[in-house]
Each structure stands twice: as C-alpha cells, then as structure tokens.
Image: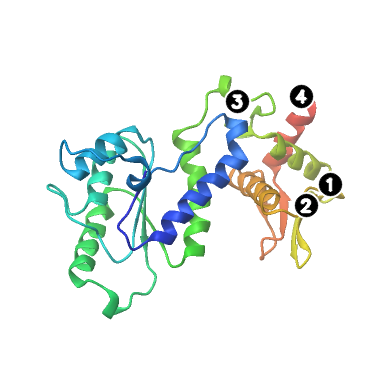
Amino acid sequence: MIASPGDVPEERQAVRELIYEWNALHADERKQVLLPVGWETHSAPDMKGPAQSIINEQVLAHCDLLVGIFWTRIGTATAEYQSGAVEEIEIHIAAGKPTMLYFSEAPVKPDATNNKQYRQLKKFKEYCKPKGLYEGFDSIADFKNKFRRQLQITIKNYFAPSQNDVLDSSIFLESAVNERITLSADEQELLKAASIDSRGLIHRSKISAGTYVETNKKQFINIQSAREIAKWNAVLESLLNKGLIKAVGYKGEVFEITAEGFDVADGILESA
C-alpha cells in the first residue's frame, strides 16, 4: 500500500518503479511478486459508507506492507484521523504489519506551502519519532537509493520464503558466524569467480560505453541494458549487505571478498 498526500507524486511513482525492478530481479527466484497498491488504482465506487472506510476495506485490509511518504502536506482529514494517509498508517501498524515511513527534507517554498498542513505534518512527525524508525530524504535520487536498499531489507526481515519455496538454483549455506545465508544463482556465480580471482577483487566500471562488472578476468554484464545493469548492481548490493564482500574503492568501483565470503564460496564449490 502506498499511502501519501497529493504532493509527492514523483515519490509514489518511484515506489512503483522500484517494486517492478525488484520483481524483475527476484520474483522468479523467490517465487514472490510485489504488487504496488493505491486507492486510486485498486478501489471501486461504493456508497455504503465514508470514502476512507471503503478504501480501508477494499484495499488496505488486503495489503501486507505499507509505504508512507510525506513532504509538505498531511492530507485531508477523515472522521477520526488527521488525514486518510495517517488513518491507513495507524490501522496498518495496529494490525501488526510492517510500515516503511518516509519524510522528505527537500526545500520548501514558503509561498507554495499551506501553513496549517505543514504544521500538522510536523506534529505528526514528532508523534512518530518515539514510536519507531522512519527515514528522511532530500531528493528523488536519494529516496530511490534508500528505498531500493531498504525494500530488500524489509522483504528479507518480514517475507523471507520458506526453504521449500526457494528454487533449486539457490543454495543455503552456514556462514562462519553460524547464520543461514541464501544466495541466488547470480550471487553464487559472482562470489565463486571472486574467490578464484588472484586478488579476490570485483571491479565495477561506469564509463561512457556502459557499466561493467568483472572479476577473475570474466565480464558479467554482457548486454548493456538497463535491466541487466540493475540486476548486477543488485547482486553486488546483496553481497555487500550479507557481508560477503566489502567496498574498498571510494567511488564504489572496487569490492573485496571477505573472509566470510571465502568460506561461503568454498561451500558453493564443494557442493557443485
């Protein structure tokens, strides 16, 4: 569920695009598909009660994860809450479901801001502060970078598939710290190659001709398409998050396999 007032249309669209990107990279492997949902696309006219209650019944009740986004407005008040977005957030949290909440810190033009809305939003933000962890962002690019990474974390924490649901191309390995690590076929391939590389390094080059990921003299991006580049960037990000590689170049161009990464790679090679 994407919950927000009407002043963050770019962010709402970014959520949809990044969800589609996640599906392209992970849906087949994990046997999970994320569906971006909003009242404007998933509700139908019904005159049996207040509009927000109908949205809650038709849409919100069926959602597993909520993404809330605010900038200068809190939205239109409902019968019981400061706004429809706030009502959706409160009901979703009360149901014990995960909520990812974002507040834009982009500059605001005073003459383009509704002071009452902005004051109410600031109060809501203060209200949320002791209740959990929310995220700030200062641009669309910043929001995309954070949401892409944090969506991965949230899916991993709340919606990890059972072992029986994982395709044979994934492998479960016990790491050096006795934690279960799940690797996709692409992650296995890149980690194995890095473990064989004489220096244990992975290079990511972004030049005018395109983006390249290389280790052990092997090139992993063979087609310069946005989809293929996004896939291998996600593989690198996943290996980083799992502690199997670490960044050693200040521009995100060089990665080094960690001791744990070598242990996991050895397990992959032994099981092959």
Q: Secondary structure at mark 2?
A: strand
Marks 3, 1: nearer the viewer: 3
Q: Disc 4 or disc 3, which is closer to the eye?
A: 3
Type of amino acid under label 3: Val
Q: Which residue is mark 1?
A: 197
* Contact between labelled residues 3 and 4, with CB atoms less than 8 Å apart: no
Label 4, label 3: how many angstroms apart (C-alpha)? 17 Å
Q: Alpha-carbon neighbours of circle 3 within 10 Å: few (<14), some, or many (≥20)?
A: some
Find disc 2 in the rendering and name its residue.
201
- What's the amino acid at mark 4? Ser
| Sooner in the amino-acid sequence: mark 4 or mark 3 | 3
Is there a contact, CB below 8 Å, between mark 2 and mark 3? no
Question: Quick one: label 1 or label 4, which is nearer the N terminus?
Answer: 1
Identify whether 72 is placed above or below 186: below
What's the amino acid at mark 1?
Asp
Q: Amino acid at mark 2?
A: Leu
Q: In whole angstroms, how far apart are the C-alphas of marks 2 and 3?
A: 29 Å
Does dot 1 land on a helix, a strand or a loop?
A: loop
Q: Is residue 181 visible?
A: no
Q: Looking at this rendering, what residue extends furthest in the left direction?
A: 79
Q: Is residue 121 left or right of residue 19?
A: left
Task: Name the image quarter holding residue 244.
Answer: top right
Label 2 with label 1: CB-CB less than 8 Å:
yes
- Which residue has dot 3 on it? 166
Q: Which residue is mark 4?
A: 271
Please tell me whether residue 84 is drawn above or below residue 108 in the rendered image.
Answer: above
Q: How far across and down, in percent of the image, does residue 211 sit?
A: 74, 59
Could you tell me how many numbered marks the image carries? 4
